[in-house]
Amino acid sequence: MNAHLPAALLAAPFLAAPVVGAVPPGATDAPTAPAPAPAPASASAFATALRLTVSGPAPATTAPSPDATVPSAPAARSVTLRCDPAGGDHPRVEAACADLDASQGRVERASDTACVLLYDPVEVHAEGVWRGRPVSFTRQYGNTCELNARTGAVFAF
């Protein structure tokens, strides 16, 4: 440490320190409002907000109907998922947020679930932020079983 630093620090308050309670000439001694406290760091800076989209078969089934026709896949459906605090229009918001927290924000995870080898493709997309980190995820799965096994509650809507 510099030997001259402590002496400079001790002398500094005496060089330009104002006298506490002194009123400059011409000023009134009326009380003034205290300066506003600095705003706390925004909690939303580390929040989660994702737009989730699923395109493909309906959650129930796309099995052939009794007249042997296969219903067409519905249009894409989307929801908003917010965590910290939980919100949005995702039907299983608490479970989806818990799945993202458990995987450190990764949408997809490893799974040893065995699914039927039925090709009924479903495509998913997630865009937004997880705890302040950008998220952009797009993947196609062979069927909804594979989707649910690999993404948990995140795309369960």
Image (cartoon, rainbow, N blue to C red):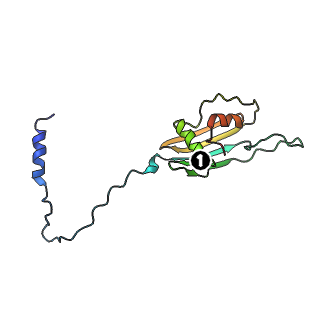
Q: Nearer the viewer, residue 92 or 118?
A: 92
Horizontal arrangement in the rendering, residue 147 relative to residue 23 (left or right): right
- Quarter of the image containing the N terminus? top left
Q: Nearer the viewer, residue 65 or 85?
A: 85
Q: Is residue 70 visible?
A: yes
Q: Amino acid at mark 1?
A: Val
Q: Which residue is drawn at the image coordinates 60% and 30% (left, top)?
A: 110
129 versus 29 height, above or below: above
Q: Nearer the viewer, residue 76 or 108?
A: 108
Q: Is residue 105 visible?
A: no
Q: Report how many numbered discs are placed on residues in the image.
A: 1
Q: Position of residue 48 (x, y in %)?
A: 52, 46
Horizontal arrangement in the rendering, residue 154 relative to residue 116 (left or right): left
Q: Position of residue 134 (x, y in %)?
A: 51, 42
Q: Which residue is drawn at the image coordinates 59% and 32% (left, top)?
A: 109
Q: Which residue is drawn at the image coordinates 59% and 50% (left, top)?
A: 80
Q: Nearer the viewer, residue 114 or 45?
A: 114
Q: Residue furthest right?
A: 67
24 versus 9 height, above or below: below
Mark 1, other Cα within 10 Å: few <14 / some 14–19 / many ≥20: many
Secondary element under disc 1, as helix, strand or loop, is helix
The picture quadrant where one finds residue 148 is top right
18 versus 8 height, above or below: below
Horizontal arrangement in the rendering, residue 148 relative to residue 9 (left or right): right
Q: Position of residue 58 (x, y in %)?
A: 74, 44
| Residue wearing tag 1 | 93
Q: Position of residue 16 (x, y in %)?
A: 12, 54
